[in-house]
Amino acid sequence: MSSEKNSTSSSSSVPVTGCLSIFQGIFASKPTTFTSEEFNEKNAHLYSGENSTTSTLPPAYQLVSQQMSQLLVNETGVALSDLWEKDEFAKAVHLAIEGVSSELRAISLKLHEDPELSYEEHRAHALLTDYLEKKGFEVERKAYGLDTAFVARAGTSDKVTIGICSEYDALPSTDSPTGAFQACGHNLIAISGVATAIGLKSVIQQFGLEGQVKLFGTPAEETSGGKIVMLDRGAFKGVDVCMMLHGANADVVYPAFLALDTVEVEFFGKASHASASPWEGINALDAAVQAYTNIAMMRQQMHPSQRVHGIIKDGGKAANIIPDYTKSVYTVRAPKFAEVEVLKKRVEKIFNAAATSTGCTVKLTWGIPYKDIITNNPLARKFEHYMNNQGVKYASKQEQMSKLSGSTDMGNLTYALPGIHPMFNILNLIGEDDKTMGLHTNAFAHAAAQPVAHVATLRASKSLALTGLECIVDSVFLKAVKQDFDTQVQN
């Protein structure tokens, strides 16, 4: 999830305030790491083509699984987990995902210990596509002209196509020896997509359903928006709905992601000697500073939900030379993409005014905009229903939407077709928000490798798979999904 909230903390411990005591020992343990040889030897079963029916996960994982089973009861003691016994479709999804739990755990840890930056996710691409192919998916590698994108398909009918997204790029880190870390938990997003696709594939094939699942491997979410490139190149044509999951410090079905656009601002002036003949120069740094200052003044008249933040990347070459060139980068954010378009015009006036007042010329280069999330209401309610059946309780929709988050290229997909982007708590299974631990921090990166995060990921994946399944088996529900999308996009 793209955000400017990178942490400067080097702490590797994870706060566990409010969590069950069982998690304390789990979070204290360090993430498991392997050399390439150890990983290949330890996880040879990943490429056997057979589902693992016997768990090989560590004792800490088993403890968390037992704890979750105790959560699956309501206040009167009635079991909620009987969903898997009462509904044959749900049971098929449950068994398929649980059957590959240990395999997905190994993949998650590999992605965590071997992070790769945007558009450099070559090892992740190979690991995921090889695994999916062994699991019976038709896999297209290097899809849509992107070396680290892929599409994995299953199902024989195009009557209904359910799209699922996996992300696997990491964030840059000066503390990590690899130069990157999974501080946004994309190792979990990657396996959540795989798990959801496996669950859907199993039930489609087992019951002969007329439906198709497409798992999209989408690179570069943290930087230039791989999903947007894939969308523009037709990747999601013919897909009825597209969904994905994201780990977080809270359980949220209606996330408030901000739309954004980023601009590179270049001022061009005239160099001169700063002491001998400063009057002959045109100071590009003056223009950059004026722009920076005037944006700061503009914030007083901005709505509290809107953001403009930036840096001066190039402010000149020497103190005794009037700078003839500067480069700044600014990001403009707002809850809705239409608001971003209005805010862009305001900052453009500031950049042009700074150029005019200093005698400079200015060049503005806008990037690829990230739109806000349009959460499809029928899909969200269905996902919430299945999560409720697994012991998850949510705050009100209004409260959920009041928590402003970062930005994501998934927003652009939800403007093109129906979708949802639920956030699931990777820190505990009892629905307690942890405001002390934000995404894009070292602590969150550590948490993304813990057993409780894996359990939470599979729980959410089952709910997402069942939500997609509803679109295949219930034409009335799918129609409602599309009507809600049409209504929201038009508004």
Image: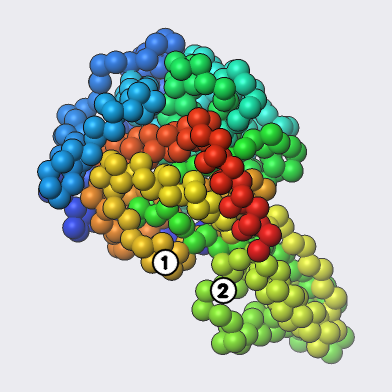
* Quadrant assignment for the C terminus: bottom right
| Residue type, numbered disc 2 | Gln
Name the residue: 56% across, 35% down. 475
Occupied quadrant, residue 50: top left
Residue 332 position (above or below residue 471): below
x and y, in percent, of residue 11 in the image: 30, 55
| Residue type, numbered disc 1 | Gln
Marks 2 and 1: which is nearer the front? 1
- For label 1, the SS is helix
Q: Which residue is mark 1?
A: 398
Question: Which one is in front, 290 or 427?
Answer: 427
Confirm whether residue 78 shows in the render: yes
x and y, in percent, of residue 324 in the image: 80, 74
Residue 164 position (above or below residue 258): above
Name the residue: 66% across, 85% down. 294
Name the residue: 29% across, 42% down. 389
Q: Which residue is mark 2?
A: 306
Occupied quadrant, residue 53: top left
Residue 38 position (above or below residue 304): above
Left or right: residue 100 compared with residue 24: right
Left or right: residue 423 compared with residue 389: right
Confirm whether residue 453 shows in the render: no
Name the residue: 51% across, 26% down. 128
